[in-house]
Amino acid sequence: MKVDYQKELKKHGFSLLICLKSVSLDKNMSAEDVLLLISKIDNCLISLYKKLEELAVSEEVKNVFGNLASLEQNEMRKIIHNIQKVDGI
């Protein structure tokens, strides 16, 4: 069974473009600003992968999207750690 993921995402109200609209670049960004920007992008990707995991029909595809979500969550932990280092927390 073939799944049109774009159509399914739209039907369930998820749009990566809308999610990414909260991301804005500025030439005067600090290192902390860049890390926060990256964390917003990671959050968008995590949400996308989790939604695609829910919509997937086969277990193999569910696992792929679940693994991608896990990888992004691990990346997010590293980013949070780096933000704390920048802040001196």
Image (tube, rainbow, N blue to C red):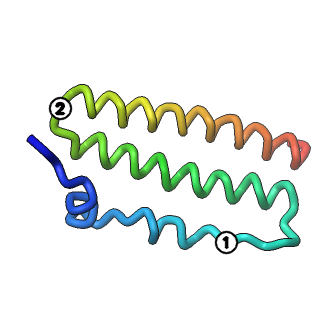
Can you give x and y, in whole percent of width and height, for residue 62 in the image? 27, 33
Q: Report the front residue among 83 and 66.
A: 66
User: Residue tagged by mark 1?
Assistant: 24
Instruction: Using the image as rendered, state which of residue 61 and residue 35 is in the foreground.
Output: 61
Residue at 8%, 41% (x, y): give it.
1
Disc 1 on helix, strand or loop?
A: loop
Q: Element under label 2?
A: loop
Name which residue lies at 16% across and 38% down: 57
Q: Which amino acid type is shown beneath numbered disc 2? A: Ser
What numbered label is drawn on residue 58? Answer: 2
Q: Earlier in the sequence, mark 2 or mark 1?
A: 1
Amino acid at circle 1: Ser
The crowding category of the residue bearing disc 2, from other C-alpha atoms within 10 Å (few below 14, some 14 to 19, many at least 20), is few
In this rendering, position of residue 28 left or right of residue 5: right
Q: Position of residue 55 (x, y in %)?
A: 22, 46
- Residue sitting farthest toward the left: 1
Q: Residue at x 86, y 40 (%)?
A: 85
Judge from the rendering whether residue 80 lies leftward or rightward of residue 11; answer left or right: right
* Mark carried by residue 69: none
State the image coordinates of residue 17 (x, y, percent, origin top left).
45, 68
- Compared to residue 49, the image places residue 65 above or below, namely above
Label 2, label 1: how far apart the Cα atoms are: 36 Å
Q: Is residue 83 above or below residue 28?
A: above
